[in-house]
Amino acid sequence: MRKIVPIIALFYMVQQSFAQNTTVISATLSGIAADAYPETSKGNVTDTFFGKVVADPYRWLEDDMSEETKAWVKRQNMVTNTYLDSIKFRDKIKERLTELWNYEKFSAPFKEGEYTYFYKNDGLQNQSVLYRQKGSATPEIFLNPNDFSKDGTTSLAGIDFSKDGTLCAFQISEGGSDWRKVIVLDAKTRKQVGDTLYDVKFSGLSWKGNDGFYYSSYDKPKEGSALSGMTQMHKLYYHKMGTKQSVDVLVFGGEAQPRRYVSGGVTEDQQYLVISAANATYGNELYIKDLNTPDAPIRTIVTGFDNEQDIIYAEDGKLYILTNQGAPNRKLVVTDAANPAPANWKVLIPETKFPLSVSTCGRKLFAQYLKDAVSQVYQYDLNGKQERTIQLPGLGTAGGFGGKRDEKELYYSYTSYIYPSTIFRYDIATGKSAVYKKPNVKFDPSLYESKQVFYTSKDGTKVPMIITYKKGMQKNSKNATMLYGYGGFNVSLTPSFSISNLVFMENGGIYAVANLRGGGEYGDEWHNAGTKMKKQNVFDDFIAAAEYLISEKYTDKYHLAISGGSNGGLLVGACITQRPDLYAVAFPAVGVLDMLRYHKFTAGAGWAYDYGTANDSKEMFEYLLKYSPVHNAKPGTAYPATMIMTADHDDRVVPAHSFKFAAAMQAVQRETTANPMLIRIETKAGHGAGKPTAMIIQEQVDKWGFMLYNMGLSYNKK
């Protein structure tokens, strides 16, 4: 069991730069005329916070359904596309990226009923296909999301099977939206059973036998502005098979228990319904209901939002709970389900100096630690006895280590910046791993190097960063370099292979990832050091990373690009408004950019643990105003070449953030420099998940072309 708490994280780990070229071409060759930007009208809207009046001239852009906003979007895309089309070497980039992308990709297999299921993409399919196989029989297609829509923008967003594997419920996302449809199939015949469920959001699907399943959602808001749904509360429902969605039973949430995020899941033994409830992306309450006792009440395990706790396993009346109560790096405890209060918790795996996560399979516990942002994995028995260390191929990221309690083997993945994601089969009894699926990527890892460094931030904090490049790279201050960061919501950036990065690295580029405060790389203390009125630490860490790369002669300010998505889009927006002199190119993607109003948009109020809100106090308001990117576009400042990126169906970080930021930055950029300040707005796309392959490739082609062109470089396949 894991609680479902939607954060704004989207890991844009495919940001990249390109080959070194010691000749820097004048910015006027890659610039844009001041009159090329669309005119953006200014309104007279203001807000007053603690006696201070703050203008919001682009408030009208928050209504993303208005005809005026639609016309503005169309004009902006025309300018951006015209600019990008002038970069002729983009065709070469697309050719090379498409060539490298075209290899078979597999997921780890999982067992449901009589079948083993797995995802496969032939290479360039827009969506991966779900296959199944019985024994040694030839695999057959179970679900092909490429048939959901002609353009590939409708995706399979999750699937959950009943305990015996005879029924499954799967979610569909259209155009990248977080709002989902749910369809139930008879797994044997693959025919739909019952009606389609609509308007499901931020939800898993958890079956109670074959009778029905639990899911979560909000009341669907009316179509309209970005503010739709700002006061919504999450609700957990039970859908009984054979009945209409309109009669689904409200289990938790709503007016009786108003919570922004509620999830429910049935333990594998079908004994308990576990409910997690939260009002922010950190901290949750925990409840339990005995499903085998008629009319059993929902019982409280933990109330309040000061800590986090997840029930990861249940058997023989015992609950195994991962918690950070008194343990910022987390510990695993066990308790009796009949009396599960924290006073009765017994520690099985104690806290260490490294952040802990735990999964289960075959009645074993798999403890996964992060040591300086790389994985270490250990196997324990259910009594907390360590049985072995799992040997990994190197310093990278391992994932998986989960499965059903009666299984004898499991599958896990391993990857690093120079190790393509590979699936291993693991024998639980012997502890032996063997390669199960290795991708046939045209890549020789012996030609590349990935090393970790520790640099010093503004306040003296040591911050880790992993730098990856082709061997033989010369520290001549002229290498095109992409610096990526996130720094928020307890999210850890760990090593991961990317075909996009390969295209850039094979041409001599450097890819650097900084593990900033605000993330989860060193547990809660690291996270909290980048929240609320400590958020500036995150920006200082990123700026210090850029300064380190320059001082160590990896690159210079003419060859350095920065990138980040979602909370990372805020990071990039804040860093270019605070230190515009430090970078050549910037990519703030799907960013949280209006810090005075973010909590009024869709699910934004749930992010207040990390950010605070402008209504909290005068001090919090002033702190947010000081770094809010939308409010810090300064006349007379030359900003780096920037391509803001968003999507029309992003209902998590609404496009209004990017629209307003683009308008504000264009207004000052046209006065001072020829460096472009563009916005790229995708259609039929959301916050990032479920994008078709063709759309992903084109996005990367546009970014690389923009970056190279604005560094005075070109692209040459090597």
Image (cartoon, rainbow, N blue to C red):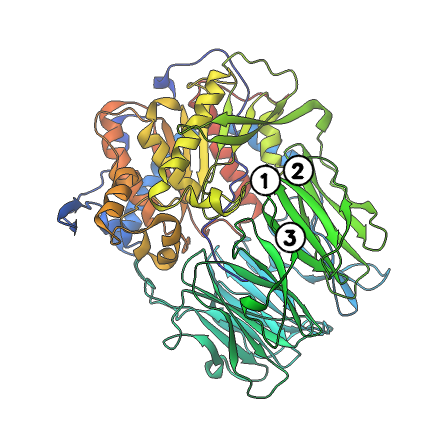
The crowding category of the residue bearing disc 1, from other C-alpha atoms within 10 Å (few below 14, some 14 to 19, many at least 20), is many
Give the label, 3 or 2, closer to the camera: 2
At 55% across and 56% down in the image, what residue appears?
150
Residue 513 visible in the picture: yes
Rendered position, 518 above or below 540? below
Of pointers 1 and 2, the one earlier in the residue sequence: 2
Does dot 2 land on a helix, a strand or a loop? loop
Of pointers 3 and 1, the one earlier in the residue sequence: 3
Most extreme residue toward the front, as rendered? 343
Give the label, 3 or 1, closer to the camera: 1
Cα separation, mark 3 vs mark 2, equals 25 Å
At 59% across and 40% down in the image, what residue appears?
494
Residue 173: where, in percent of width, then height?
51, 60
Residue 187: where, in percent of width, then height?
70, 71
Cα separation, mark 3 vs mark 1, equals 24 Å
Give the residue pinned by disc 3: 128
Give the residue pinned by disc 1: 494
Residue 535: where, in percent of width, then height?
37, 41
Report the amino acid beneath label 1. Thr
Residue 444 visible in the picture: no
Q: Quadrant of the N terminus?
A: bottom right
Report the front residue among 662 and 681: 662
Report the amino acid beneath label 3. Ser
Instruction: Check whether the beta carbons of the residues at disc 1 and disc 2 lie within 8 A of each other.
Output: yes
**Which mark, by number, is residue 396?**
2
Q: Quadrant of the C terminus?
A: top right
Report the front residue among 340 and 2: 340
Report the front residue among 638 and 371: 371
